[in-house]
Amino acid sequence: MEQVKKKRIRPRERDAVIQSLRAGVTPRAGIQHIQVGRRREIEAMLKDIERIGDGGTAFRLIIGAYGSGKSFFLQLVRLIAQEKGLVTVHADLSPDRRLHATGGQARGLFAELMKNAATRAKPAGNALPSIVERFLTEAAKEADQTGSEVEAVIHQRLEHLSELVGGYDFAKVIAAYREGHETDNHQLTNDAVRWLRGEFSTKTDARKQLGVRVIIDDARFYDQLKLLSLFVRQAGYKGLLVNLDEMVNLYKLNNKKARESNYEQILRMLNDSLQGGSEGLGFLMGGTPEFLLDPRKGLYSYEALQSRLAENRFANQAGVVDYSATALHLANLTPEELYLLLCNIRHVFAAGDPANYLLPDEALTQFLSHCANRIGEAYFRTPRNTIKAFVDLLSLLEQDQQLDWGELIGRVELKPELQSDMPDSTPAGQGDDELSSFQL
Amino acid sequence: MNSAASNSNSAAFARLHRGVQRWIWGQGWTALRDIQEAAVNPLLAGDRDVVISAATASGKTEAAFLPICSRLAEEPAEGIGVLYISPLKALITDQHRRLESLCEHVGLQITPWHGDVPKSLKTKLRRRPRGILLITPESLESLLIHQMGWLKTAFAPLRYIVIDEFHAFIGSERGCQLLSLLTRLGFLLDKEVPRVALSATLGDLVMVGKCLRPAEAGCEPAVIESAALKSSLKIQLRGYLIPDRPHDEDDNPVDTVQNQIVADLFSILRGKSHLVFANSRRWTEYFAAELADRCAVHALPNEFFPHHGNLAKELREQLEARLLEGRLPTTAVCTMTLELGIDIGSVDSVAQVAAPHSVASLRQRLGRSGRRGEAAVLRLFIKEQEVTADSGAADRLRFHTMRCAALISLLLKKWYEPPLTGLNHFSTLVHQVLAVIGQYGGARADQLHRLLCARGPFQETEPAAFAALLRSMGEDELISQTHDGQLVLGVKGENLVGHYSFFSVFKTPEEYRLEAGGKVLGTVPVDGPLLVDQIIIFAGKRWRIESVDDEKKVITLTKAKGGSPPLFLGDPLLVHDRVRQEMFALFESGECPVYFDAVARDHFEEAVSGFREWELADRPWLVSGANLWVFPWLGDRVVNALAILVTEQGFQAGNDDGILEVRNCSEAAFKQAIKTHLAGPRLTKKDLAARLEGSPIEKYDKWVPKSLRQQSQSGHFFDLEGAYQWLERKTDFLR
């Protein structure tokens, strides 16, 4: 139980964690305080991050059933990567955000990624302007040291990019930003950032505002990420980590052609990563088992991907997990891990001071067994609800310490979580019980 | 029609927008018509559904759009304000032309949207969604599945949904799809939009209102009905007598009566455009070929073409295009395929070479006739068999002729078959489940049920039946389930949804091969329920069904022994109770309709004298030879159910055109059997369903579990309650 005796927790982090957990979303900060287990997986990720920092590449599929904590895990890796000096971008895929498209959905994904660009100094996102600023500062510094012109340094640093597809225009936009910066032309700097974020939708506008002939459209999605990874390294960061979650949305595309084009894009990323076609760039993709394994509609339906992603047969035979495999399978939390998780949450709630614990250890056990009685083993698969109920319980106790926790636990209501892409009209799970737990 | 108050003192006119008023002046109208006047207030309020009912060309469209455009002009919407849905592409083109200038006057954009609309128009609307959108249900389905995001923002300010030709949708698969689409749209937009139904004059308009929003009882629509008279109708019924002559081996319909009908058709129809309705494909082919031959013999260009579901699509479309263009005289000899949403413009007259089954379909067919302002012309060519010693009751009483008379009489009384409510459209439900999953990517079973069955038109589907339906779809890889319990499209479902043919829910019936003793006899379309032991007539002979193979689409037959038919369920096209009652009234009155020709008159006289001789006004059944004939004077659903009940008691019985024929049965035995049955446990709907084969009939039936198919078919084709009620009314005769 080494996690429990951790250092004190800053109030800001404490509140952020509690609020996120109550809302049922993964916390953005302070996540390390509640993380349990996954030691080997995190080690593997650390190696990946190190490799990216050395100018190498990484490509991982994080595969886990619903509720196994994929998003949580991706978030954790993202924070670690920021700590290690990487720029991170992340987004959930959706019907409007895909890797490949012709109707603007790939640009939509790119724009979302850029909106969420984060660094250690700017963990909350929207870090793109500060990355450009840092690039310019670094260039100025170098110019100072070497006694050369800033222009020349910038030119020399961006020359490397120009060899790539779209690099020339990229360099022009950076130049436009600098010009705006020097001349206090906010419109120009804003336009440059908008261009980098993929928010220009017509070439005419781009030419008028920035003098470049191209925009970031669906077709340039991946090339632009490659450019960005080189750029952030020139700006003094270690590299770029791209987190893509909810990949199951590609599996759900109901057009076979569209789905295969997206899988082809994944293949391209994977090949580049294996063959060194990119630099300082890593991809983490979170998806459910059917996204990977379904032989008709999943990644395995795309033959070139299946052979590259197949599980390590030797590891399987030996009954061990190969943590270096491209597809990393996350197991559901065990009851012990869930117990530890509750301990950690209690710890966060008490701001890291065991003297302030609102509940004794036996209450945690009782809470878990209450959940197990309520919704059976399903709660291991949907820890989100359990945790939410637990945080709610702690909040109540915090407000009124006279309350009897035994009675409160008895009153905790839990419902199995229901997932759907279709919005609910009336509160879900009303009435027709026969269908709410429907199995084909 | 322009006799009402002048514009200046019409209160309704004053409420319209200036631009709309200016357009009305520009049209040179001196007054609004009655329905146009009456529609202004409820539509401007825009807070309830409205049904506008009037004959064709009586200004229904304007009645709806004058106030609608007014409101849109006063309160412009940042998006599409009106959704207009029409069953026909041609009607959309037509309405677009009609409404364009009105919309111009108030600065509204109006966009037609269907398969043939140029892409540029659609792109323009996509970029800047405004005004009025004219669309078919199929295109709306496609938009919902493929453009849900756009639809949600573009339709956000939607104020009205106008449905044209609403009567054509009622009770059909397509109507069910339409209602489901409207429910899904309301769900997507998270608001209820007033629905405006434009409909031909129908008997029971309250019922129409219920069909407009079936899920919500109690929100009655405003009903606006035209008092103006319908455009005129010219009818002739020509009788033909088939002399008694043994059929030749192949039953080639080459007898003199057929030749006579062909000759008459040729001389009457040539030179203009017409539709000839024959009730089966075989006859369609026969008439078209004979008429084309005649053209060749007279060295004239051919203007007669067949049209039915089995014909190659290109041939059908060629014919439809030729009719629509209207440049060359063209006569299509068709089955009911031309009755449904296909654009052919209007023709000079409609001919029936077989007795129609329902007022609804007769009216629909008639609607094709009568170019603007001209009278609709209907000619019926009705054959009757010469009466012999072993003629059946229906032949003796000239039931074909009498049914035509009853149908026309009801048509003139503006009665119209109400749609069968409380039916399960499982095939359409399969379609809608796929569509909703395709639309959202994934959905849970309980959500689907809530949307489609609790809120949508599939009210009769219980959760248990719905679960069975989903499992059946899952077995066939139409859908699959992810780990988190969501249903997503399976491989097959994806192919179905991805294909352009997915958007429509109706199809032409499946052909089954008929085999007897290992020999193939031919094929028949299956559009009604099949039962083992059922007797069907094919190639002029009676056959008993041995077995039905739905997979291979084979029906195995054995020859039925001679004599009158045992279990014989009538046509799949069902005659309504009211039609048979009207026939009874005609028999009783004995007044021959004026539009009968001499031969038809003879038939009528024969029928009436037969009716009197048998004292059918006072007795519900009579014995003829070894058999018993029962006359319920009720619809086929009741008679079919009676046939099943009597069969339960060990008799062989069948429905012969509304007459229940019981073989080898004395009156005493019949009475005893009925009394025993009524005293004992009654047949339930479930028992009845289990007796049916449940062969797939509708487009997606093959994915509906057999038990549900049986259930839905038993509801469609049998009225058990009606049968028991009739028996109870006849207890006096059972003593």
Image (tube, helix red, strand yellow):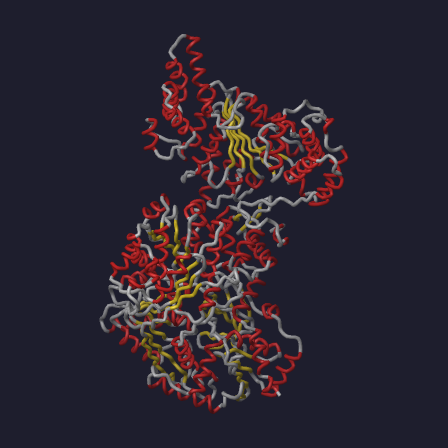
From the viewer's side, name the closer residue of B439 and A150: A150
Q: Position of residue B163 (x, y in %)?
A: 40, 59
B171 sits left or right of B93 in the view: right
User: What residue is shown at x 48% (from left), y 18% (from top)?
Assistant: A236
Q: Quadrant of residue B231?
A: bottom left
Q: Position of residue B610 (x, y in %)?
A: 45, 89
From the viewer's side, name the closer residue of B209 and B464: B209
- Is B419 situated above or below B566? above
The quadrant of the rendering that contains the C terminus of chain B is bottom right
A391 sits left or right of B355 in the view: right
User: What residue is shown at x 72% (from left), y 28% (from top)?
Assistant: A356
> Seen from this angle, which residue lies furthest bottom?
B613
Q: Position of residue A58 (x, y in %)?
A: 53, 27
Q: Position of residue B301 (x, y in %)?
A: 24, 68
- Is B543 situated above or below A368? below
Please give the count of numbered marks on the rendered protein: 0
User: What residue is shown at x 59% (from left), y 36% (from top)?
Assistant: A25
Q: Is residue B666 visible?
A: no
